[in-house]
Image: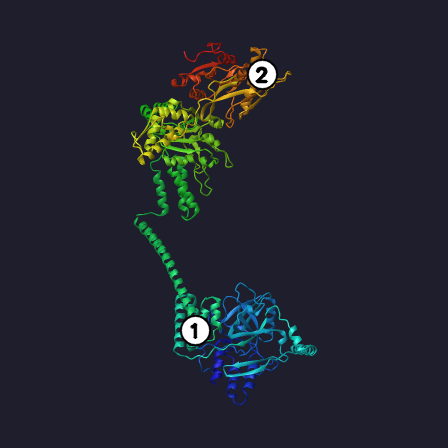
Amino acid sequence: MHAANALVRNTVLFNPSLRSSTRIARNVSQIASHLSKKSAGNRLLKCYNRYSAHNCRVAAYDGNLPIINQIYSSRLFSTGNKNDPEEEDPPVDVKDETPLFSSQLPATVAVPEVWPQVPVIAINRNPVFPRFIKLIEISNPALIDLIRRKVKLNQPYVGIFLRKKEDEKSDVVSTLDDLHDVGVFAQIHEMQDMDYKLRLVVMAHRRIKITGQFVEDEIETGPAEMKLKFPVFNVEFNVTREETDAERRRRKYRNTRRKTSDTEEPAGEKETKKVLPDQVMMVKVENMQHEKFQQNEEVKALTQEVIKTIRDIINMNPLYRESLHHMLAQGQRVVDNPVYLSDLGAALTGAEPADLQAVLEEMDIPKRLMMSLSLLKKEYELSKLQQKIGKEVEEKVKQQHRKYILHEQLKVIKKELGLEKDDKDAIGDKFRERLADKQVPAAVQTVIDEELNKLNFLESHSSEFNVTRCYLDWLTSLPWGVTSEENLKLEDAQVILDEDHYGMEDIKKRILEFIAVSQLKGSTQGKILCFHGPPGVGKTSIARSIARALNRQYFRFSVGGMTDVAEIKGHRRTYVGAMPGKLVQCLKKTATENPLVLIDEVDKIGKGVHGDPSSALLELLDPEQNANFLDHYLDVAVDLSRVLFICTANVVDLIPEPLRDRMELIDMSGYVAEEKLAIAQQYLVPTAQKNCGLSQEQMELTPESLHTLIKSYCRESGVRNLQKHIEKIARKVAFKIVKKEADKMVIDESNLSDLVGKPTFKHDRMYDVTPPGVVMGLAWTAMGGSTLYIETALRNTFKDDKLTAGSMELTGHLGDVMKESARIALTVARNFLAELRPDNNFLNTSHIHLHVPEGATPKDGPSAGVTITSALLSLALRRPVRAQLAMTGEVSLTGRVLPVGGIKEKIIAAKRVGVTCVILPEENRRDFDDLPSFIREGIDVHFVGEYEDVFKIAFEQDQMVAAGIKRAFN
């Protein structure tokens, strides 16, 4: 009864629903009691047939979770006759004398020891080891049909083999070479059919080896037989699988066809015509038995080491802790079974497929144990490294968390002791403290109070909280009612302005007037000034000197190329990263309401898709509007009426007319050679010596060298290029002193070219004596004044008796205005020549070419009218104009001479090239009289109102006084 009781105990243990059934206990008891009266095969066959058709529950375990407590409901497959009647057993009360729970593993489902043909399932990555359960999904239609058919025939057995190539994902292979020969024989415990794929729960039982491919022609002609082995009763026998009537008819039909074909064809031809299928669906296999081994000291040591390593892995890796803890405590069956331990150790590792397959193929148990132990040791080292990394990361996290907790506790302690307030309260107190000494307007104070109340209701981690805090930070940082004390002493301001800049009398006089008005009025005021002139004359640097003279804070920003209105008016707070405009930033930086703001390059302001910044400057630079300047970000009125705005520009005409109307324009013309010499001696040379670390004794620039430098290298109106050349000289002197080539250097005309190179301007003038048809004119450029020649000549010298109408070709990169001025000059010259010489038809019949040299330089403007007219008359009369003569002025169609601009620059350019006589329009007399005396000295200026006066001065040299002409100097 012991075997029967064990069978009942193991059955009831894993199927609570069968515990109340007494039929199992009674029948098993009958089997045990009548074991000696009947043959073993008949008795076991009867028992198997009676109870194998009923549903039961099987306990299973796999490689990851060796003991699965879940109970799988499945079908048992039997060879019994389904038509056998069931016996009615009376209920009998049976009392279990043995405990229901045991430490031994449950008995497995009985499977045949030999099964020669099995379907093939190819898997990737990890092979399956015996006594482990695996979940497999099959998607190949042919293989799905085969397994369905085998399951329906009560043959739920498959062979699972590892694929040699891991990149292929198919369930079947084309040849046996794609598979490893050794795999496992597995029983299907559960099958889930999902139409397009099949999900199988299989349990591996033993190792098998492929002996060949199995094809349909090798099916036996008789009913299939299988060998059954019952470990409980230690009995095995062969049984014939029962066929249905349909299967029996199909088998007989196939046998008949095979016999017919065998009689018709010889055996050799039959073998040659046998074609293997494209896919390996079934294979012939044989069982693999491990070599016999003895439980010697080596095997025991290996077994204990494997167990120890597995325990170490369990302790270090929590993934295996729960799943393997109970398995290792099962007792002798697990611990003392080297065969199972070797498979268990290999299955626990994440080794390479080749290493796992080698363990599966190894039949020597000590070698298999050694291979599993090697894989376990590698897994153990990997677990140690993983644990080390995890501890380091955990330690860092703990430190950060601990620091955060301590900071929070410190905040709470300080708050309880009154040493520190809450974050919101502290922020609010900080903002209120900023406004303590400021005179905030009522409207602005209302907005600040509302925002502070809003801040108290917001969460500190919300985005709205940060937006509100930044807005309050800007509002409270502005200097509401805070002004710097201005310097209202004219003498001190005069000294500061003279220290920094030479000349610039107009600007210095205007600043002193501003101080005088502020002194009489008793309060400071704002103003909008615009300094315009060529580059390098000191427009930007004089603004800093003015701020120092007035004791005001200085702020500069350039609007050259600016295309976004938000740079001036600010962004709206709804945008991410919004900021106020430049003026609000200026007030925050200078911390006063009356700074000096320099807006540089106002004539180069751009215009883009984000608005027109020049239009935004209208509100900023309007004295009537900037008292309530509204920034888009602040959205409150800001008083800019006390700000002194200074703008700089090179060309006034490029400034928009509405903007130019709001500014007070102050002209800053270029410097003459005498002014440049004084600036170089007083400012540029000492600054260059200081920047290069030289003393006055180590470098000395003589006045002659400076004059040569100005005349031959730096003829522009400003002094920026002159400053570069002086700095270049200072660097070369410093280099020679450091190399000990000289202790000091005196730069004169002899060694100047060695330091700065060859002269840029070799000739002062293009023509020392102007030929007929060539007249020197005066022009204004952004770089200052310059001289230009008007050249005229005949296009065709071929003489033809036939008179034709004359023409004129214009070259020299002339603008439209200058082309129109040339045509007007031609008309004036023809009319004047007709009155002067009626018999001279040169201008009416000749083809004239008019050219202005330096053709790459654009030229435009009406001021060359009198010059072109004089050149045409000089060509027609074949008589040169007066020597050392230059002229400028616009001519009208009736011969009147109209005023032009840039008189100072033009006079400076005339003196630069050695001109002694200049003709100017009568209406420009006041501009000439405003020039400094050192500019007017050494030059004769004639003021004219009609072109007739110009002709008399240019062509009648002996006549010093003509109608309407007066000498410039008495």
Q: Nearer the viewer, residue 523 or 327?
A: 327
The crowding category of the residue bearing disc 1, from other C-alpha atoms within 10 Å (few below 14, some 14 to 19, many at least 20), is many
Image position, residue 273 (x, y; %): 66, 73
The crowding category of the residue bearing disc 2, from other C-alpha atoms within 10 Å (few below 14, some 14 to 19, many at least 20), is many
Task: Give amino acid for label 1.
Answer: Leu
Image position, residue 517 (x, y; %): 36, 23
Q: Quadrant of the C terminus?
A: top left
Q: Is residue 582 above or below residue 366?
A: above
Residue 549: quarter of image: top left
Q: Nearer the viewer, residue 320 or 35?
A: 320
Image position, residue 948 (x, y; %): 52, 12
The residue at the point 36 percent across, 44 percent down is 427
CB under 8 Å between discs 1 and 2 = no
**Disc 2 on helix, strand or loop?**
helix
Determine the CA span between mark 1 and mark 2: 121 Å
Q: Is residue 835 visible?
A: yes
Q: Which residue is mark 2?
A: 843
**Disc 1 on helix, strand or loop?**
helix
